[in-house]
Amino acid sequence: MHYVYVLKDKKNKLYTGYSSDLKRRLQEHKQGHVHTTYRMDTVQLIYYEAFTDKIDAHEREKYLKTTQGKRTLKIMLKHTFAAFV
């Protein structure tokens, strides 16, 4: 499986990423081994999607990183974001 995931830190900063091994990748984020998130405070997985095809997962990741993708994510997770306002 191939996963697209979204992490949130204590300051409500989001990070969207891709991995074929979600559990391992989350551990790397939490241990500070990922360059793009090592400065984020206590990351938490708030959303993920699973794909059988790697290309589909990469395309979804790219979309979620666009302005429209971020809007879609906030609409889909409106209660999650409302809890952190």
Image (spheres, rainbow, N blue to C red):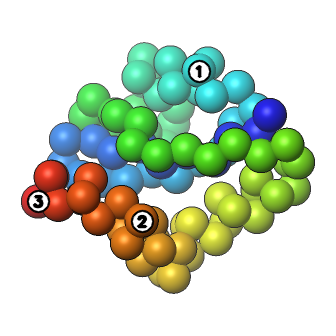
- Eyeballing the image, is 83 above or below 52? below
**Residue 16 horizontal/vertical position (percent):** 52, 52
- Marks 3 and 2, Cα distance to the nearest angstrom? 16 Å
- Marks 2 and 1, Cα distance to the nearest angstrom? 23 Å
* Secondary structure at numbered mark 2: helix
Residue for point 55% across, 67% down: 65
Q: Residues within 10 Å of mark 1 (few under 14, many from 20)?
A: few
Work out which quarter of the rendered image holds the N terminus and state it.
top right
Amino acid at dot 1? Lys
Q: Which residue is mark 1?
A: 23
Amino acid at dot 2? Met
Residue for point 42% across, 65% down: 76
Residue for point 24% across, 58% down: 79
Going from N to C along the chain, the mark reached first, 2 or 1, is 1
Going from N to C along the chain, the mark reached first, 3 or 1, is 1
* Secondary structure at numbered mark 3: loop
**Residue 14 horizontal/vertical position (percent):** 37, 53
User: Which of 50/63 is in front?
Assistant: 50
**Residue 35 horizontal/vertical position (percent):** 51, 36
**Quick check: can you spot residue 45?**
yes
Amino acid at dot 3? Val
User: Which of 11/59 is in front?
Assistant: 59
Residue for point 85% across, 43% down: 52
The image quadrant that residue 46 belongs to is top left
Q: Which residue is mark 2?
A: 76
**Quick check: can you spot residue 39?**
no
Q: Is residue 69 left or right of residue 85?
A: right
Q: Nearer the viewer, mark 3 or mark 2?
A: 2
Q: Which residue is mark 3?
A: 85
Residue at the bottom extreme of this rendering: 68
